[in-house]
Amino acid sequence: MTPVVELDDVTALDVRRAVDALAGCRIAVLTGAGVSTDSGIPDYRGKGAPTRTPMTWQTFRESEAARRRYWVGSHLGWRAFSAAAPNRGHAALAALEEHGLASGVVTQNVDGLHLQAGSRRVIELHGTMRRVGCTACGQVFDRRDLAARIEADNPWITVPDAVELGPDGDVLPASSDRFVVPDCSVCGGMLRPDIVFFGEYVPALRFGEAEQLVAASGALLVAGSSLAVNSGVRLVERARRRRLPVVIVNRGETRADRRASVKIDAGTSEVLQALSDGLLAR
């Protein structure tokens, strides 16, 4: 049974305003890392987030040492990352889609938790940690199979009970000198996770699909994103130009607060559940 949501008076009032703004609309949803923090996956930019220097595609591509460091850290984090479970915010969005109120989710996250929660139309703007691809021949591998290969090639590696997990499922390894980097089992080429690295652009076709989702909807709900990444801001701007209601749920400021019909400065899990409950009751 879903627990009753308890909100402070200000947040409860904002939720009622948001329900009024979204009621009667098919809602496109845009989510960021803040939606997954209650599942144990940290936010790069949220309050209290550790300072991190994410791997760029250029560094990964050009440095063998960097790839070794990336893969050992990514593997250690993968075990914790892949064990994360959807929270009630994910479940609330899946419920809105199930009842025909949400047209789909565009997510900046690579954790796959929206799909696990039951959302069916999910556009993963920044890719997914579930797959790994060869940069030479294009062969795609399931991350679980690659993890088994990594552990077979590196029998010394152990996953600690607690790791400082990053939003992209990596950790900062103490050492990577002994690590055997996995290569493509088909052609021996360089492997890379199926994600958009820092320094890369979201693929045009994928962003076009996200734009189409917004264009076919009557409102936009942004949850757990500071909109620091341009792709998110561009989707908000598409909605604003069409004069769609825009509701933003995020702890702290975002780059689009002034464009929002309603801004709710609160945690996403409880607010998304309250929004879903309110909209489904209409």
Image (spheres, rainbow, N blue to C red):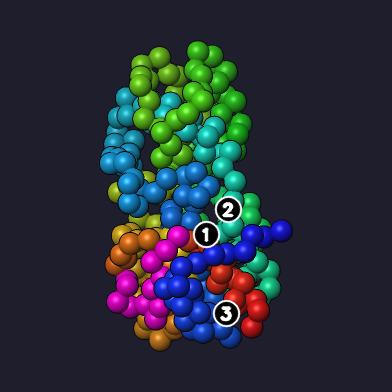
For disc 2, the marked residue is 87
Query: How packed is label 3: few (under 14 Cα within 10 Å), some, or many (20 or more)?
Result: many
- Callout 2–callout 1 Cβ contact below 8 Å: yes
Q: As drawn, which residue projects farthest toward the front? A: 9
- How far is mark 3 from mark 1, CA to CA? 21 Å
Q: Which residue type carries mark 1?
A: Ser
Q: Position of residue 189 (x, y in %)?
A: 46, 31
Which residues make up the magenta segment? 256-267
For disc 1, the marked residue is 269
For disc 3, the marked residue is 26
Residue at the spot 52% in from the left edge and 72% down from the top edge: 28
| Mark 3 or mark 1: whose residue is earlier in sequence | 3
Judge from the rendering whether residue 48 lies leftward or rightward of residue 264; answer left or right: left
- Callout 2–callout 3 Cβ contact below 8 Å: no
- How far is mark 2 from mark 3, CA to CA? 23 Å
Q: Nearer the viewer, residue 81 or 176?
A: 81
Q: Position of residue 138 (x, y in %)?
A: 51, 42
Up-down: is 149 above or below 195? above
Query: How packed is label 2: few (under 14 Cα within 10 Å), some, or many (20 or more)?
Result: many
